[in-house]
Amino acid sequence: MEFEIYKELGIDEKVLKLSSEVMDELKERFETIDEIAEYNQMKVLKAMQECRVAEAHFGTSTGYGYNDDGRDTLEKVYAKTFHTEDALVRAQITCGTHALHLALSANLRPGDELLSPVGKPYDTLEEVIGIRPSVGSLKEYGVSYRQVDLLEDGSFNYEAIKEAINEKTKVVTIQRSKGYASRPTFSVNQIGELIAFIKGIKPEVIVMVDNCYGEFIEKIEPSDVDADMIVGSLIKNPGGGLAPIGGYIAGKKECIERCAYRLTSPGLGKEVGASLGMNQTFFQGFFLAPTVSAGAEKGAIFAAAIYEKLGYKVIPSSREIRHDIIQAVEMRSPEGLIAFCKGIQAAAPVDSYVSPEPWAMPGYDDEVIMAAGAFVQGSSIELSADGPLRPPYTAFFQGGLTFNHARFGIMMSVQKLLEAKIIEL
Ligand SMILES: *Cc1c(COP(=O)(O)O)cnc(C)c1O
């Protein structure tokens, strides 16, 4: 390793040594990830070539955005890559939650029921669904909700799922990534088994998979195992770190059509929606997404390995197969969590000189600390960490536009723990 430059950046020799040791242990692991990234890179490239992506597609549109060939071709590229009939990829989709709400509200009607067979969904979906009372929730529109929790060992409760499916069940929502819950993330094959089971009981049901943080981590996506819609955010994996906004929904033609009419208006659908200069960035970000996601995944594994060595509990472990890019590290004390986040912040390319402090964030019971120095606000494909100030003081770490940067962030977090005398090396 280039010791000098790291020392100039404030990293102790002992941290460097530890980092080098961990790197040696991970070589084989990383080869597998590179191989998946290589395959996915070719998958995206092939889709771009088959869709005849051209320089002309990088033009922009304003106003209504009629005849925006670039936008329409981008949606074809997404559909081809994810092996779906159609896709909606828009700057007008403001974030992942919006994309998920769009997919659900477009495909559910009053009197229908939504089923989550994988336990409680991501925090922000509680208000979308109306689990927590909220203005404009699906519940307000007469859509009921049913949930089947996972079994204690994290597996699907098939018996209870069978019982929960009824004549009202219209849409099933499956969250691929654990998000910030403590359950395991599901592999695409596990999701496929669950979908097959559900469609065996009720074939006409629409299955939506929340694909956030999961894109390009495996060679297949949930759309390859019969999901009717996959949904995600462009400021996570598929934006490749370049997209400054946006969301996508890829899936069956009639599902996407309903989403388009919901996003814009009945009668208008996909025909409108100016791309406002985003086309080139969205194409280029999607092109980079397989390697950027792989870099973030390697960063998560590096974090797991180094913190395991330091005696911390990490989820998942450094040896487990991954299905998303989130890493949890139980820091055991408020001081530990704060030092971890201060390290991530100090490693950022933007706002590295500020120091994150815990604060009472709206919607959370405990104080939360967040570290991010990103080019795109809130982008979690960029190096970031956060965690609520409550036992076991878990730091959630994700992102890094390059593996080198993700690794440096983790080294800096260890450095801060060392300086605060929370660990010894
Ligand atoms: C990030 C995320 C969301 C919500 O996305 P936002 O862009 O933050 O609104 C939903 N589900 C999962 C699993 C996520 O990781």
Image (cartoon, rainbow, N blue to C red):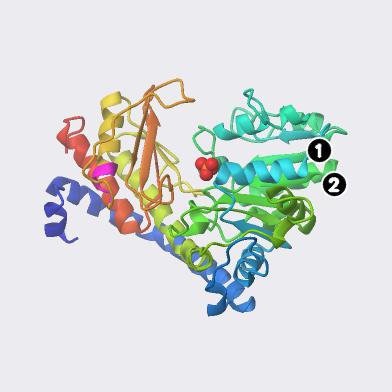
Coordinates of residue 126 in the picture (x, y in percent): 61, 30
Whole-Å distance between the Cαs marked 1 and 2? 18 Å
Residue 254 figure quarter:
bottom right
Q: Residues within 10 Å of mark 2 (few under 14, many from 20)?
A: few
In what element is the residue under mark 1? loop
Residue range in magenta is 344-348
Residue 248 to residue 326: above or below:
below
Q: Quadrant of ligand 1?
A: top right
* Kind of residue indicated by mark 2: Pro
Chief secondary structure of the magenta portion: helix
* Kind of residue indicated by mark 1: Arg
Which residue does the numbered mark 2 point to in the structure image? 203
Residue at x-position 71% and y-position 56%: 251
In this rendering, does residue 224 appear at all? yes
In the image, is residue 76 part of the stretch drawn in magenta? no
In primary-sequence order, the first of circles 1 and 2 is 1
Which residue does the numbered mark 1 point to in the structure image? 109
Coordinates of residue 241 in the picture (x, y in percent): 43, 57
Residue 1 figure quarter:
bottom left
